[in-house]
Protein backbone atom coordinates (compact mmCIF):
# COMPACT_ATOMS: atom_id res chain seq x y z
CA UNK A 1 0.00 0.00 0.00
CA UNK A 2 2.33 2.72 -1.21
CA UNK A 3 1.55 6.43 -1.39
CA UNK A 4 -1.14 7.35 -3.95
CA UNK A 5 0.24 8.98 -7.10
CA UNK A 6 -1.14 10.30 -10.39
CA UNK A 7 0.41 8.71 -13.48
CA UNK A 8 1.51 10.83 -16.44
CA UNK A 9 2.84 9.80 -19.85
CA UNK A 10 6.43 10.51 -20.89
CA UNK A 11 7.73 12.37 -23.91
CA UNK A 12 8.21 9.89 -26.77
CA UNK A 13 11.79 10.73 -27.82
CA UNK A 14 14.97 11.58 -25.96
CA UNK A 15 16.44 14.78 -27.45
CA UNK A 16 20.00 14.81 -28.77
CA UNK A 17 20.67 18.20 -27.16
CA UNK A 18 19.11 20.61 -24.70
CA UNK A 19 19.81 23.97 -23.12
CA UNK A 20 19.40 22.41 -19.68
CA UNK A 21 19.09 18.81 -18.50
CA UNK A 22 17.45 18.35 -15.09
CA UNK A 23 18.10 15.07 -13.27
CA UNK A 24 15.35 14.04 -10.87
CA UNK A 25 11.57 14.15 -11.30
CA UNK A 26 10.68 15.21 -7.77
CA UNK A 27 9.23 18.56 -6.77
CA UNK A 28 12.52 20.47 -7.10
CA UNK A 29 13.49 19.02 -10.47
CA UNK A 30 10.00 19.43 -11.87
CA UNK A 31 9.60 23.06 -10.82
CA UNK A 32 13.10 23.91 -12.03
CA UNK A 33 12.15 22.47 -15.43
CA UNK A 34 8.75 24.18 -15.28
CA UNK A 35 10.18 27.68 -14.86
CA UNK A 36 13.02 27.18 -17.33
CA UNK A 37 10.60 25.92 -19.98
CA UNK A 38 8.26 28.86 -19.41
CA UNK A 39 11.22 31.14 -20.22
CA UNK A 40 11.70 29.50 -23.60
CA UNK A 41 14.64 27.22 -22.87
CA UNK A 42 14.86 23.73 -24.31
CA UNK A 43 14.70 21.52 -21.22
CA UNK A 44 14.89 17.75 -20.77
CA UNK A 45 13.80 16.33 -17.40
CA UNK A 46 15.13 12.85 -16.56
CA UNK A 47 13.53 10.56 -13.98
CA UNK A 48 14.80 7.03 -13.36
CA UNK A 49 11.33 5.89 -12.21
CA UNK A 50 8.05 7.81 -12.14
CA UNK A 51 7.64 11.53 -11.58
CA UNK A 52 7.15 12.26 -7.84
CA UNK A 53 7.21 8.59 -6.88
CA UNK A 54 9.66 9.09 -4.03
CA UNK A 55 9.54 11.72 -1.28
CA UNK A 56 7.52 14.23 -3.33
CA UNK A 57 4.42 12.04 -2.95
CA UNK A 58 5.31 10.60 0.48
CA UNK A 59 5.32 13.77 2.60
CA UNK A 60 2.56 15.55 4.54
CA UNK A 61 1.81 18.09 1.82
CA UNK A 62 2.41 21.10 4.08
CA UNK A 63 3.41 24.38 2.42
CA UNK A 64 4.43 26.48 5.38
CA UNK A 65 6.27 29.49 6.68
CA UNK A 66 5.52 28.68 10.32
CA UNK A 67 8.63 27.61 12.26
CA UNK A 68 10.94 27.88 9.27
CA UNK A 69 14.61 28.51 9.90
CA UNK A 70 15.55 32.12 9.10
CA UNK A 71 17.56 30.95 6.10
CA UNK A 72 14.55 29.18 4.58
CA UNK A 73 11.77 31.62 5.43
CA UNK A 74 12.19 33.91 2.37
CA UNK A 75 11.97 31.02 -0.09
CA UNK A 76 9.02 29.53 1.82
CA UNK A 77 7.11 32.82 1.54
CA UNK A 78 7.80 33.12 -2.19
CA UNK A 79 6.83 29.50 -2.71
CA UNK A 80 3.37 30.03 -1.24
CA UNK A 81 2.70 32.77 -3.79
CA UNK A 82 3.99 30.55 -6.58
CA UNK A 83 1.85 27.60 -5.47
CA UNK A 84 -1.20 29.82 -5.98
CA UNK A 85 -0.06 30.90 -9.43
CA UNK A 86 0.65 27.36 -10.68
CA UNK A 87 -3.04 26.46 -10.63
CA UNK A 88 -3.85 29.53 -12.74
CA UNK A 89 -0.95 28.95 -15.12
CA UNK A 90 -1.68 25.26 -15.71
CA UNK A 91 -5.46 25.43 -15.49
CA UNK A 92 -5.37 22.37 -13.19
CA UNK A 93 -6.07 21.90 -9.51
CA UNK A 94 -2.92 20.99 -7.57
CA UNK A 95 -4.94 20.84 -4.36
CA UNK A 96 -3.14 23.89 -2.95
CA UNK A 97 -5.17 25.81 -0.39
CA UNK A 98 -4.19 28.38 2.21
CA UNK A 99 -6.20 26.54 4.82
CA UNK A 100 -3.97 27.62 7.68
CA UNK A 101 -1.94 25.33 9.94
CA UNK A 102 -2.97 24.73 13.55
CA UNK A 103 -0.44 23.90 16.28
CA UNK A 104 -1.60 22.88 19.78
CA UNK A 105 0.48 22.23 22.88
CA UNK A 106 0.51 21.83 26.65
CA UNK A 107 4.30 22.21 26.80
CA UNK A 108 5.38 25.60 28.14
CA UNK A 109 8.81 25.38 26.49
CA UNK A 110 7.27 24.55 23.12
CA UNK A 111 4.85 27.46 23.40
CA UNK A 112 7.70 29.79 24.35
CA UNK A 113 9.64 28.64 21.27
CA UNK A 114 6.66 29.37 19.03
CA UNK A 115 6.28 32.81 20.59
CA UNK A 116 9.96 33.51 19.93
CA UNK A 117 9.51 32.49 16.29
CA UNK A 118 6.40 34.71 16.05
CA UNK A 119 8.47 37.71 17.14
CA UNK A 120 11.11 36.90 14.51
CA UNK A 121 8.49 36.32 11.82
CA UNK A 122 7.07 39.81 12.36
CA UNK A 123 10.41 41.27 11.28
CA UNK A 124 10.06 39.32 8.01
CA UNK A 125 6.46 40.42 7.40
CA UNK A 126 4.97 37.00 8.19
CA UNK A 127 1.70 36.76 10.09
CA UNK A 128 1.24 34.09 12.72
CA UNK A 129 -1.10 34.13 15.71
CA UNK A 130 -0.28 32.80 19.17
CA UNK A 131 -3.42 31.28 20.65
CA UNK A 132 -4.52 31.68 24.24
CA UNK A 133 -5.81 28.64 26.08
CA UNK A 134 -9.37 29.68 25.27
CA UNK A 135 -8.59 30.17 21.58
CA UNK A 136 -6.64 26.91 21.36
CA UNK A 137 -9.49 25.01 22.97
CA UNK A 138 -11.97 26.49 20.51
CA UNK A 139 -9.87 25.71 17.43
CA UNK A 140 -8.94 22.31 18.85
CA UNK A 141 -12.39 21.32 20.05
CA UNK A 142 -12.35 18.23 17.83
CA UNK A 143 -9.73 16.78 20.19
CA UNK A 144 -12.01 17.02 23.23
CA UNK A 145 -8.94 18.09 25.25
CA UNK A 146 -7.83 21.18 27.12
CA UNK A 147 -4.82 23.05 25.74
CA UNK A 148 -2.55 25.66 27.27
CA UNK A 149 -2.08 27.39 23.93
CA UNK A 150 -1.09 27.09 20.33
CA UNK A 151 -0.35 28.80 17.05
CA UNK A 152 -2.43 29.41 13.93
CA UNK A 153 -0.65 30.43 10.72
CA UNK A 154 -3.47 31.64 8.44
CA UNK A 155 -1.48 32.17 5.23
CA UNK A 156 0.11 28.71 5.22
CA UNK A 157 -1.55 25.73 3.57
CA UNK A 158 -1.31 22.33 1.94
CA UNK A 159 -1.18 20.85 -1.56
CA UNK A 160 -2.15 17.41 -2.84
CA UNK A 161 0.96 15.23 -2.81
CA UNK A 162 -0.65 12.67 -5.11
CA UNK A 163 -1.04 15.04 -8.05
CA UNK A 164 0.62 18.45 -7.55
CA UNK A 165 4.03 17.54 -8.97
CA UNK A 166 2.72 15.37 -11.85
CA UNK A 167 0.48 18.28 -12.89
CA UNK A 168 3.49 20.60 -13.04
CA UNK A 169 5.43 17.96 -15.01
CA UNK A 170 2.61 17.71 -17.53
CA UNK A 171 2.77 21.50 -17.91
CA UNK A 172 6.45 21.22 -18.83
CA UNK A 173 5.53 19.14 -21.87
CA UNK A 174 2.68 21.49 -22.76
CA UNK A 175 5.17 24.36 -22.82
CA UNK A 176 7.61 22.54 -25.10
CA UNK A 177 9.91 20.74 -22.69
CA UNK A 178 10.37 16.98 -22.49
CA UNK A 179 9.90 14.60 -19.55
CA UNK A 180 11.55 11.17 -19.63
CA UNK A 181 10.45 8.61 -17.05
CA UNK A 182 12.15 5.23 -16.64
CA UNK A 183 15.32 6.93 -17.89
CA UNK A 184 18.21 7.10 -15.43
CA UNK A 185 21.12 9.52 -15.79
CA UNK A 186 24.32 7.50 -15.44
CA UNK A 187 26.79 10.38 -15.37
CA UNK A 188 28.21 13.45 -17.08
CA UNK A 189 30.54 14.08 -19.98
CA UNK A 190 33.02 16.93 -19.55
CA UNK A 191 35.15 18.97 -21.94
CA UNK A 192 37.88 21.06 -20.38
CA UNK A 193 36.39 20.36 -16.98
CA UNK A 194 32.99 21.83 -17.94
CA UNK A 195 29.71 20.02 -18.50
CA UNK A 196 29.22 18.97 -22.10
CA UNK A 197 26.60 16.22 -21.86
CA UNK A 198 24.57 13.80 -19.79
CA UNK A 199 24.85 10.07 -20.39
CA UNK A 200 21.56 8.27 -19.82
CA UNK A 201 20.59 4.63 -20.16
CA UNK A 202 18.84 5.58 -23.41
CA UNK A 203 21.58 7.72 -24.94
CA UNK A 204 23.53 10.96 -24.50
CA UNK A 205 22.09 14.48 -24.42
CA UNK A 206 24.45 17.31 -25.34
CA UNK A 207 24.14 20.23 -22.92
CA UNK A 208 26.22 22.81 -21.07
CA UNK A 209 24.03 22.99 -17.98
CA UNK A 210 22.86 20.19 -15.67
CA UNK A 211 20.77 20.43 -12.51
CA UNK A 212 21.13 17.54 -10.08
CA UNK A 213 17.85 17.31 -8.16
CA UNK A 214 18.02 13.61 -7.38
CA UNK A 215 16.89 13.77 -3.76
CA UNK A 216 18.31 10.97 -1.64
CA UNK A 217 20.38 9.74 -4.62
CA UNK A 218 22.26 13.01 -5.12
CA UNK A 219 25.35 12.27 -3.04
CA UNK A 220 26.06 8.91 -4.67
CA UNK A 221 25.77 10.59 -8.10
CA UNK A 222 28.11 13.39 -7.00
CA UNK A 223 30.57 10.76 -5.78
CA UNK A 224 31.02 9.58 -9.36
CA UNK A 225 32.28 13.07 -10.22
CA UNK A 226 34.68 13.37 -7.30
CA UNK A 227 32.34 15.76 -5.47
CA UNK A 228 32.05 15.25 -1.72
CA UNK A 229 28.46 16.11 -0.84
CA UNK A 230 27.63 15.23 2.80
CA UNK A 231 24.10 13.88 2.75
CA UNK A 232 22.27 11.35 4.87
CA UNK A 233 18.67 10.18 5.03
CA UNK A 234 16.25 8.85 7.61
CA UNK A 235 13.23 6.61 7.01
CA UNK A 236 9.88 8.02 8.06
CA UNK A 237 6.66 5.96 8.13
CA UNK A 238 3.27 7.49 7.34
CA UNK A 239 -0.28 6.27 6.92
CA UNK A 240 -3.48 7.51 5.32
CA UNK A 241 -7.05 6.94 6.50
CA UNK A 242 -10.07 6.54 4.26
CA UNK A 243 -12.54 9.47 4.03
CA UNK A 244 -15.35 9.78 6.53
CA UNK A 245 -14.16 12.14 9.27
CA UNK A 246 -15.94 15.49 9.61
CA UNK A 247 -15.35 18.59 11.70
CA UNK A 248 -11.56 18.22 11.93
CA UNK A 249 -8.88 20.86 11.19
CA UNK A 250 -7.39 20.70 7.71
CA UNK A 251 -3.85 20.57 9.08
CA UNK A 252 -3.05 19.94 12.74
CA UNK A 253 0.19 19.50 14.66
CA UNK A 254 0.26 18.20 18.23
CA UNK A 255 3.06 16.48 20.09
CA UNK A 256 1.26 13.16 19.89
CA UNK A 257 0.57 13.16 16.16
CA UNK A 258 -0.02 15.36 13.12
CA UNK A 259 -2.97 15.09 10.75
CA UNK A 260 -3.52 16.52 7.27
CA UNK A 261 -6.69 16.39 5.18
CA UNK A 262 -6.00 14.73 1.82
CA UNK A 263 -7.58 15.68 -1.47
CA UNK A 264 -10.00 12.75 -1.28
CA UNK A 265 -11.23 13.76 2.17
CA UNK A 266 -9.14 11.21 4.03
CA UNK A 267 -6.29 12.09 6.40
CA UNK A 268 -2.53 11.62 6.36
CA UNK A 269 -1.15 10.81 9.82
CA UNK A 270 2.43 10.98 11.09
CA UNK A 271 4.44 11.65 14.23
CA UNK A 272 6.49 14.79 13.63
CA UNK A 273 10.22 14.13 13.46
CA UNK A 274 9.93 10.43 14.29
CA UNK A 275 12.10 8.37 11.96
CA UNK A 276 14.43 5.39 11.70
CA UNK A 277 18.14 5.71 11.09
CA UNK A 278 19.16 2.92 8.71
CA UNK A 279 22.92 2.29 8.56
CA UNK A 280 24.44 2.70 5.09
CA UNK A 281 27.96 3.19 3.71
CA UNK A 282 27.20 6.87 3.25
CA UNK A 283 26.01 7.23 6.85
CA UNK A 284 29.41 6.02 8.04
CA UNK A 285 31.32 8.19 5.57
CA UNK A 286 29.63 11.41 6.69
CA UNK A 287 29.05 10.47 10.31
CA UNK A 288 31.28 13.22 11.73
CA UNK A 289 29.51 15.98 9.79
CA UNK A 290 26.13 14.87 11.16
CA UNK A 291 27.10 14.70 14.84
CA UNK A 292 25.59 18.16 15.64
CA UNK A 293 22.36 17.22 13.85
CA UNK A 294 22.20 13.92 15.71
CA UNK A 295 22.93 15.60 19.05
CA UNK A 296 19.98 17.94 18.54
CA UNK A 297 17.47 15.39 17.26
CA UNK A 298 18.48 12.00 18.59
CA UNK A 299 15.36 11.74 20.77
CA UNK A 300 13.22 11.52 17.63
CA UNK A 301 15.32 8.85 15.93
CA UNK A 302 15.06 5.12 16.40
CA UNK A 303 17.46 2.40 15.39
CA UNK A 304 16.76 1.24 11.87
CA UNK A 305 17.66 -1.89 9.98
CA UNK A 306 19.51 -2.76 6.79
CA UNK A 307 16.61 -1.44 4.72
CA UNK A 308 18.72 1.54 3.63
CA UNK A 309 21.66 -0.65 2.68
CA UNK A 310 19.34 -2.82 0.61
CA UNK A 311 17.85 0.15 -1.25
CA UNK A 312 21.26 1.20 -2.59
CA UNK A 313 20.72 4.97 -2.70
CA UNK A 314 23.59 5.67 -0.28
CA UNK A 315 26.17 3.43 -1.89
CA UNK A 316 29.80 4.47 -2.24
CA UNK A 317 30.25 2.25 -5.30
CA UNK A 318 31.60 3.58 -8.57
CA UNK A 319 30.14 2.63 -11.94
CA UNK A 320 31.07 3.09 -15.58
CA UNK A 321 28.83 5.04 -17.95
CA UNK A 322 28.12 1.92 -20.00
CA UNK A 323 27.07 -0.13 -16.94
CA UNK A 324 23.70 -0.63 -15.29
CA UNK A 325 23.61 1.70 -12.27
CA UNK A 326 22.02 1.37 -8.82
CA UNK A 327 19.29 3.78 -9.99
CA UNK A 328 18.26 1.33 -12.71
CA UNK A 329 18.27 -1.57 -10.28
CA UNK A 330 15.95 0.32 -7.92
CA UNK A 331 13.73 2.67 -9.92
CA UNK A 332 11.80 3.88 -6.88
CA UNK A 333 12.80 4.13 -3.24
CA UNK A 334 9.89 2.29 -1.64
CA UNK A 335 11.21 1.18 1.75
CA UNK A 336 9.20 -0.90 4.17
CA UNK A 337 7.28 1.18 6.70
CA UNK A 338 8.02 0.52 10.35
CA UNK A 339 4.76 -1.20 11.25
CA UNK A 340 5.08 -0.69 14.98
CA UNK A 341 5.33 3.03 14.33
CA UNK A 342 2.35 2.86 11.95
CA UNK A 343 0.27 1.23 14.67
CA UNK A 344 1.45 3.74 17.25
CA UNK A 345 0.63 6.65 14.93
CA UNK A 346 -2.85 5.29 14.27
CA UNK A 347 -3.49 4.71 17.96
CA UNK A 348 -2.34 8.20 18.92
CA UNK A 349 -4.44 9.80 16.18
CA UNK A 350 -7.59 8.01 17.31
CA UNK A 351 -6.90 9.08 20.90
CA UNK A 352 -6.37 12.69 19.88
CA UNK A 353 -9.18 12.87 17.32
CA UNK A 354 -12.05 10.50 18.23
CA UNK A 355 -13.72 11.26 14.88
CA UNK A 356 -11.06 9.08 13.24
CA UNK A 357 -12.03 5.94 15.14
CA UNK A 358 -13.51 3.26 12.94
CA UNK A 359 -11.95 4.55 9.73
CA UNK A 360 -9.80 2.06 7.85
CA UNK A 361 -6.16 2.55 6.95
CA UNK A 362 -6.16 2.99 3.17
CA UNK A 363 -2.38 3.26 2.69
CA UNK A 364 0.82 2.95 4.68
CA UNK A 365 4.26 3.79 3.36
CA UNK A 366 7.76 4.97 4.19
CA UNK A 367 10.11 7.40 2.50
CA UNK A 368 13.68 8.57 2.82
CA UNK A 369 14.11 12.18 3.94
CA UNK A 370 17.52 13.35 2.78
CA UNK A 371 19.32 15.97 4.84
CA UNK A 372 22.46 18.07 4.95
CA UNK A 373 24.49 18.46 8.17
CA UNK A 374 22.85 21.81 8.94
CA UNK A 375 19.34 20.92 7.77
CA UNK A 376 19.39 23.54 4.99
CA UNK A 377 19.41 22.50 1.30
CA UNK A 378 22.47 22.74 -0.93
CA UNK A 379 21.53 24.79 -4.01
CA UNK A 380 23.99 26.28 -6.46
CA UNK A 381 26.71 25.65 -9.01
CA UNK A 382 29.48 23.32 -7.87
CA UNK A 383 32.75 25.23 -8.13
CA UNK A 384 34.79 22.27 -9.38
CA UNK A 385 32.52 21.56 -12.39
CA UNK A 386 31.18 24.65 -14.19
CA UNK A 387 27.68 24.05 -15.50
CA UNK A 388 26.79 21.51 -12.77
CA UNK A 389 24.15 22.83 -10.36
CA UNK A 390 23.30 20.92 -7.22
CA UNK A 391 19.84 21.12 -5.62
CA UNK A 392 19.46 18.51 -2.88
CA UNK A 393 19.42 17.91 0.86
CA UNK A 394 16.02 19.50 1.50
CA UNK A 395 15.68 17.88 4.91
CA UNK A 396 11.96 17.19 4.64
CA UNK A 397 11.10 20.74 3.48
CA UNK A 398 11.35 20.28 -0.28
CA UNK A 399 7.67 19.89 -1.13
CA UNK A 400 6.65 23.21 0.39
CA UNK A 401 9.55 25.25 -0.98
CA UNK A 402 9.86 23.42 -4.30
CA UNK A 403 8.31 26.17 -6.47
CA UNK A 404 10.53 28.88 -4.99
CA UNK A 405 13.60 26.70 -5.37
CA UNK A 406 12.82 25.93 -9.00
CA UNK A 407 12.22 29.62 -9.72
CA UNK A 408 15.51 30.61 -8.04
CA UNK A 409 17.50 28.04 -10.02
CA UNK A 410 15.84 29.22 -13.25
CA UNK A 411 16.81 32.78 -12.30
CA UNK A 412 20.44 31.78 -11.78
CA UNK A 413 20.64 29.88 -15.07
CA UNK A 414 19.00 32.64 -17.13
CA UNK A 415 20.93 35.48 -15.49
CA UNK A 416 17.98 37.15 -13.80
CA UNK A 417 17.97 38.63 -10.32
CA UNK A 418 17.18 35.64 -8.06
CA UNK A 419 13.75 35.57 -6.45
CA UNK A 420 15.54 35.25 -3.09
CA UNK A 421 19.16 35.54 -2.01
CA UNK A 422 20.81 32.22 -2.96
CA UNK A 423 23.90 32.65 -0.77
CA UNK A 424 22.61 30.79 2.33
CA UNK A 425 22.24 27.65 0.20
CA UNK A 426 25.70 27.57 -1.41
CA UNK A 427 27.01 23.98 -1.50
CA UNK A 428 30.51 25.20 -0.60
CA UNK A 429 29.37 26.10 2.93
CA UNK A 430 29.30 22.37 3.70
CA UNK A 431 33.08 22.11 3.43
CA UNK A 432 33.31 23.14 7.06
CA UNK A 433 31.62 26.43 7.86
CA UNK A 434 28.26 24.74 8.53
CA UNK A 435 29.62 22.67 11.42
CA UNK A 436 27.21 22.93 14.34
CA UNK A 437 24.85 25.42 12.68
CA UNK A 438 21.84 23.12 12.66
CA UNK A 439 18.49 24.60 11.63
CA UNK A 440 16.37 25.44 14.66
CA UNK A 441 13.01 24.32 13.28
Image (cartoon, rainbow, N blue to C red):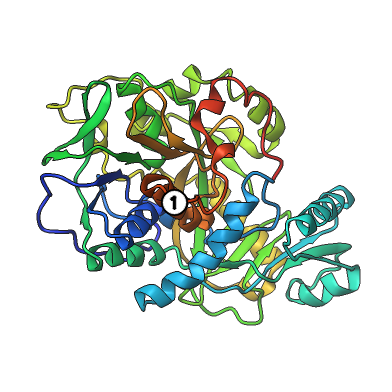
User: Residue at 89% across / 62% down in the picture?
Assistant: 148
Please give left or right for residue 344 compared with residue 328 in the image: right
Q: Is residue 333 left or right of residue 430?
A: left
Q: Is residue 59 above or below residue 127?
A: above
- Residue 200 lies in quadrant: top left
Q: Nearer the viewer, residue 107 or 72?
A: 72
Q: Position of residue 155 (x, y in %)?
A: 66, 70
Q: Is residue 10 above or below residue 294?
A: below
Q: Which residue is mark 1?
A: 416
Q: Give SS at disc 1.
A: loop
Res 274 → quadrant: top right
Q: Which of the two residues, 168 or 241, is positioned nearer the viewer here?
A: 168
Percent across and percent down for residue 414 are 37, 49
Q: Quadrant of the N terminus?
A: bottom left
Could you classify mark 1 by the number of other residues whose Cα lies within 10 Å: few (under 14), some (14-19), or many (20 or more)?
Answer: few
Location of the C terminus by quadrant is top right
Q: Nearer the viewer, residue 235 or 84?
A: 84
Note whether residue 184 is visible: yes
Residue 16: percent from left, percent from top:
10, 45
Residue 51, position in %: x, y? Answer: 30, 55
Residue located 16% across and 30% down the image: 324
Please identify the quarter of the rendering in which residue 395 is found: top right
Amino acid sequence: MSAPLMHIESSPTLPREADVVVIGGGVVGVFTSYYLTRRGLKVALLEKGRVAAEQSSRNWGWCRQQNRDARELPIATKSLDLWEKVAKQTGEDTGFRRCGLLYLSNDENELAGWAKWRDFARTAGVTTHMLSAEEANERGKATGRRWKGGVFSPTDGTADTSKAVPIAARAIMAAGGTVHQQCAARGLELIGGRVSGVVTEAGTIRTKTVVMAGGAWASSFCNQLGIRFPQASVRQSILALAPGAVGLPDALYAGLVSATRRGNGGYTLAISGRARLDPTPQQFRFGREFLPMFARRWRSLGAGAFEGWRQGHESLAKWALDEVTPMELNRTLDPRPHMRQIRQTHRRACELLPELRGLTISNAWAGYIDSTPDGIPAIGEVESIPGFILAAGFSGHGFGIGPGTGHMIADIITGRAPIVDPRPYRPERLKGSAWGKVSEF
